[in-house]
Amino acid sequence: MFQGKKVTIFGGSGFIGRNIVRELAQQGARVTVCCRDVEGAKHLKVQGVVGQVTPVHVDVTKGHGIAATLDGADMAINLCGILYESGRNRFDAVQGAAAGRIAIEAAKAGVSKLIHVSAIGADANSASHYARSKAAGEAAVKNAFPAATILRPSIVFGPDDDFFNRFGAMAEAFSFLPLVGGGKTKFQPVYVDDVARAMLSALACNAAEGKMYELGGPKLYSFRELMELVVAQ
């Protein structure tokens, strides 16, 4: 399915991206990894043979380089997202406007498959700025590329995840952890390799075009329970 195909991945050097790059390279795809820090992404080149995985500098918030990386691409994946705002990394810019830019350029380039990774809870009417920006990104993608597949993962965990490792570091530094929402908010963590496999399945399946899928693990946890697991480790 992926042998010889060119796949462009925006945000490909991040936690989820590193895993999907590995899976695609193992199946023979030529992967362009779009990121801001090319030097920091060079380690991904060893996931394939010489020249198979290519990190390229792209600033999605400004639109620089998006069209060039999609030239000749068969498929594209947008993984760009942030958990918190910092500097130029604003929710609306990264998860809203940039998602639309990528979808527009993918359509212009004639890309056959586009996977847009959003998040469970994306809602234009949410009190959360994060959730509203995710919903704005989904709407922009649907408008520009109706056949795009949208994936909404819950909290994604794995050896290098940002969520659990962040709270783990806090647990080492302090004698307490904050209980967001009183610790009652429910989560359904999903393993990063399962998310990567879901992306591959969506790329390989024509029936997934234009559809939206929510990705969650087998068990529901309260935020308090997740923090208790972190402290126990």
Image (spheres, rainbow, N blue to C red):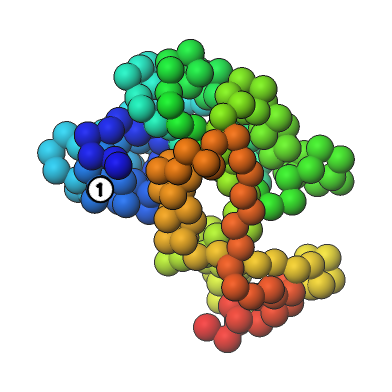
Furthest residue in direction left, as rendered: 50
Task: Return the x and y of residue 44 as percentages of the image width and height.
Answer: 27, 46
Residue 186 drawn above or below residue 151: below
Q: Is residue 36 above or below residue 42?
A: above
Residue 195 in the image: above or below residue 186: above
Residue 176 visible to an observer of this rendering: no
Inspect this view and state whether residue 143 appears.
Answer: yes
Decide if residue 89 is on the left or right side of residue 40. right
How crowded pointer 1 is (Cα within 10 Å; few <14, some 14-19, many 20+) is rated as some
Query: Position of 178 compared to 11: left or right?
Result: right
Location of residue 155 in the rendering, given as x and y in whole percent from the top left corner:
61, 60
- Measured from the top left, where is residue 171 in percent x and y? 60, 75
The residue located at (13%, 39%) in the rendering is 50
Q: What is the quadrant of residue 218 in the picture?
A: bottom right
| Kind of element beneath mark 1 | loop
Vertical side of 189 occupied by 17: above or below: above
| Amino acid at circle 1 | Gln
**The quarter of the displayed image where residue 6 is located:** top left
Q: Taking 91 as reference, is 47 left or right?
A: left
Most extreme residue toward the top is 108
Q: Which residue is mark 1?
A: 27
Which residue is located at x 48 percent, y 21 percent? 106
Which residue is depicted at the point 38% across and 53% down?
19
For the point 53% across and 24% down, the residue is 102
Counting from the top left corner in percent of width and height, residue 125 is at 86, 40
Taking depth in this image into account, of 7 and 47 the one nearest to the observer is 7
> Which quadrant holds residue 211?
top right
Q: The N terminus lies in which quarter of the figure? A: top left
